[in-house]
Image (cartoon, rainbow, N blue to C red):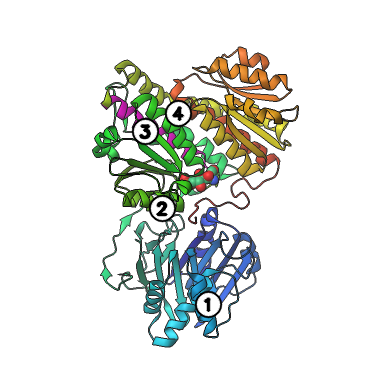
Amino acid sequence: MCGIVAYVGTKEAYPIIIKGLKRLEYRGYDSAGVALIRNNELQSFKKQGKVSNLEEFASDADTSGSIGIGHTRWATHGAPNDTNAHPHGSESGDIAIIHNGIIENYDSIKQELLRKGYTFKSDTDTEVLCYLIEDIQKNTGVKLGESVRLALQQVHGAYAIVVMSKNEPDKLIAARKSSPLVVGIGHDGDFYLASDATPIVEYTKKVVYMEDEEIALLRPGEDMKLYSIDDVEKTPYVQELEMNLEVLEKGGYDHFMLKEIHEQPRSIEDCFRGRLNATDAWVSLGGIKDYEQKMMNANRIIMVACGTSWHACLVGEYLFEDLARINVEVEYASEFRYRNPIIDENDIVIAVSQSGETADTLAALELAKSKGATILGVCNVVGSSISRITDAGSYTHAGPEIGVASTKAFTAQVTVLTLMALSLAKKKGTVSDSKFRNLISELEAIPAKVQRVLEKNSKIEYISEQYKDADNALYLGRGSSFPVALEGALKLKEISYIHAEGYPAAEMKHGPIALIDEAMPVFVIATKGTSYEKVVSNIQEVKARKGKIIAIVTEGDEQVTAIADHVIEIPETDEHLVPLLATIPLQLLSYHIAVMRECNVDQPRNLAKSVTVE
Ligand code: M6R
């Protein structure tokens, strides 16, 4: 979490930083701040809340200067207030720092500095690092870059930092470990720094993704200098960005989330483009091709993820087991990593992550790797940490997802896992040729069917109006619709703050049924398929207790339509692909309810898009 942006060059730094922070606000919005150097003076502006608060606060100030650093915070150490906002200064005020990550041993460093007589202004771990840098400079007389390097040698934890000093006003020092940091190489000898490439793409497409324990020294008009933390000079690997500016804008929609929901016909198609062919009956995921034999021979495949990506894994489990007959276990990354799991070189661990930066998922992979397992990734963000540490993987190609609530990333993850399951099934011979061809044709038809679901938006908005004041909601599904129910519940709670729970439909009678009364909306995925009749019985059980049923049904359904309070029809498809369609109305329902409750849809309270802390 936390977004960092910095600039050094000949342009005005402040507007570049503010614009960049707005692009990174999805990473946290507890506070925002900017520090600038002008005429050898360092000046900071910090404010609790969103970047717009900071802008208003600094609106009458002189914000000129061509070197600066900025930060948007998701609080870890210390309350979200003005004092704890970044940038943080050193004791003399000569040095300023921005930081994304956690300094785990900050307390012992702080105690040492307190013993030396320093006094601190904030409760943050970051300020301690800034003081340490200054203390090293005082004691050794070294320049800023070297003092940062020496300080980082004492630090345990995760960091992406940018540091500047009014005593060396023409340079930025940047470093990373476990938290992402990208350097943009400008056309005029200038440099941009950010947590991801979105604040940079507008100015340059030449970027360097910094690696763990690298330190960069950036001076306008000079080449970027890169060192390891052990002071070995390295050659920066410059890459060309493929991202366009247009995909980062709202494109006429009121919210990024709505835009991203509506992008799904295209994002699903982008995900499978060039990876399947129904006529010639093949599926091919280039990224994992060399690992497919190993996947087929593996004792089991373990999928690790968090949040929505974990739900995608649960759908993946159904697909891998049913189609490819491979044993799959799905684990919360945060639990897996601390459980001393039994893993060896015959296991395959697949991490699924939109951002590719989720700290727990990353750590779970590192653990699996240390035990000899093959580690694979399914990520959306190209060049992300997970995509770089894995042995191989497949990108989801959903494009940047800005709304904190994950929508198009989920359907793209499910699409990639479907392709993987199909490819393995074909190679193992666990599906017949006709079934295989049929599934591919059905998958190719999904984008158009998603479009048809999106066209039901007005009806979904009407239904949302009926339930916008609910305090609780239940989501039920069976088979691969159970993870869809979990995902529907997560969407509702995270953006509208309504308490919601997802359950396997048959589990309802083991407890949650006690909650049902006339005020309880129950969203049920009741599409045609293996468990249809069973789900109809579960719906009857809810109706008998006066609960309200909102059912997602297959077009033309009569049985559920006759008993439900509301139905939303989705086009018929193969049962394995139902999650790709059934998810869409649940996303729209949550969206509309959140808008009607006047919630901040794209940036829900307490959340951040990229959870880079444990
Ligand atoms: O970037 P990741 O997919 O690893 O993120 C995992 C979760 O933090 C994420 O899915 C979260 O649950 C979303 N806010 C859900 O909408």
Residue behind mark 1: 111
Residues at badges 4 and 2 in contact (C-beta under 8 Å)? Answer: no
Q: Between marks 4 and 2, how big is the CA–CA gap?
A: 34 Å
- Determine the residue positioned at 58% across, 42% down: 253
The quadrant holding residue 46 is bottom right
Is disc 4 placed on a helix, strand or loop? helix
Residue 156 visible? The answer is yes
Q: Position of residue 392 (x, y in %)?
A: 30, 44
- Determine the residue positioned at 54% across, 81% down: 114
Residue behind mark 3: 272
Q: Dot 4: within a 10 Å radius of its alpha carbon, few (fewer than 14), some, or many (20 or more) residues?
A: many
Taking depth in this image into account, of 42 and 574 the one nearest to the observer is 574
Numbered tag placed on residue 447 in the rendering: 4
Q: Dot 3: within a 10 Å radius of its alpha carbon, few (fewer than 14), some, or many (20 or more) residues?
A: many
Is disc 2 placed on a helix, strand or loop? helix
Left or right: 512 in relation to 423 = right
Asked if residue 423 lies in the magenta stretch, the reply is yes
Q: Amino acid at mark 2?
A: Ala
Predominant SS of the magenta segment: helix
Q: Amino acid at mark 1?
A: Gln
Q: Between marks 1 and 2, how big is the CA–CA gap?
A: 28 Å
Q: Between marks 3 and 1, how big is the CA–CA gap?
A: 54 Å
Q: Position of residue 320 (x, y in %)?
A: 37, 30
Circle nearer the N terminus (4, 1): 1
Is disc 1 placed on a helix, strand or loop? helix
Of discs 2 and 3, which sits in the foreground?
2
Numbered tag placed on residue 446 in the rendering: none
Bounds of the magenta segment: 406-427
Q: Amino acid at mark 3?
A: Phe
